[in-house]
């Protein structure tokens, strides 16, 4: 018999990917429409994209560990987690794509 239960770390970091995918798109849109924020981010680490990357990676790691400790593995299947990740990535791609098409 095989064990189909996902590990807490897999679920936590999978959910972190889903959340950070959406936040990445929102940060990009807010940064590009707020010149002061973009300038501040550029001043922080030399370029606004560097700061953007550090924020996204840092948030991914923090959320991954926090969520890994908080999730109940029995409530998450691989399909459910995969759908959450896929949905958030599609949302991010559409949001950024529409932003640049309309901006």
Image (cartoon, grey):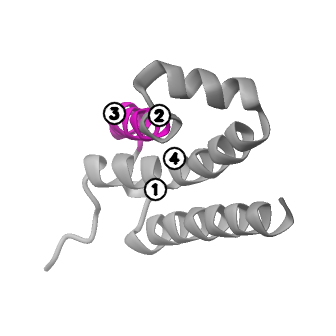
Q: Is residue 13 left or right of residue 103?
A: left
Q: Name the disc covering residue 47, or none.
A: 2
Count neighbours of disc 3 (C-alpha within 10 A) and say few if under 14, some if 14 to 19, many if 20 or more: few
Q: Is residue 54 left or right of residue 87?
A: left
Magenta stretch encompasses residue 70: yes
Q: In whole angstroms, how far apart are the C-alphas of marks 2 and 1?
A: 41 Å
Of badges 4 and 1, nearer the viewer stands: 4
Label 3, label 4: how far apart the Cα atoms are: 17 Å
Q: Is residue 18 above or below residue 31?
A: below
| Residue occupying the far right of the picture | 102
For this rendering, which residue is in front, 69 or 72? Answer: 69
* First to last magenta residue range: 51-71
Give the residue drawn at x 72%, y 23%.
Answer: 36
Q: Quadrant of the N terminus?
A: bottom left
Total numbered badges shown on the rendered structure = 4
Q: Earlier in the sequence, mark 4 or mark 2?
A: 4
Dot placed on the residue nearer the N-terminal end, 2 or 3: 2
User: Callout 1: helix, strand or loop?
Assistant: helix
Residue 19, above or below 97: above
C-alpha span from label 4 to label 1: 21 Å
Q: Answer whether labels 4 and 1 touch (C-beta < 8 Å).
A: no
Checking the image for residue 75, the label placed there is 1
**x, y percent for residue 92:** 63, 61
Is disc 2 surrounded by few (<14), some (14 to 19) or many (20+) residues within 10 Å? some
Mark earlier in primary sequence (1, 3): 3
Q: Nearer the viewer, mark 2 or mark 1?
A: 2
Precedes in sequence: disc 3 or disc 4: 4
């Amino acid at each position: 018999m095989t064990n189909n239960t996902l590990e807490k770390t897999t679920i936590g970091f999978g959910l972190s990917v889903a959340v950070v995918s959406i936040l990445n798109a929102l940060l990009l849109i807010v940064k590009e429409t707020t010149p002061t924020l973009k300038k501040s981010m550029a001043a922080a680490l030399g370029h606004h994209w560097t700061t953007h990357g550090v924020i996204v990676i840092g948030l991914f790691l923090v959320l991954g560990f926090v969520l890994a400790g908080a999730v109940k593995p029995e409530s998450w299947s691989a399909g459910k987690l995969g759908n959450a990740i896929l949905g958030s990535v599609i949302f991010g791609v559409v949001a950024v794509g529409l932003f640049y098409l309309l901006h």
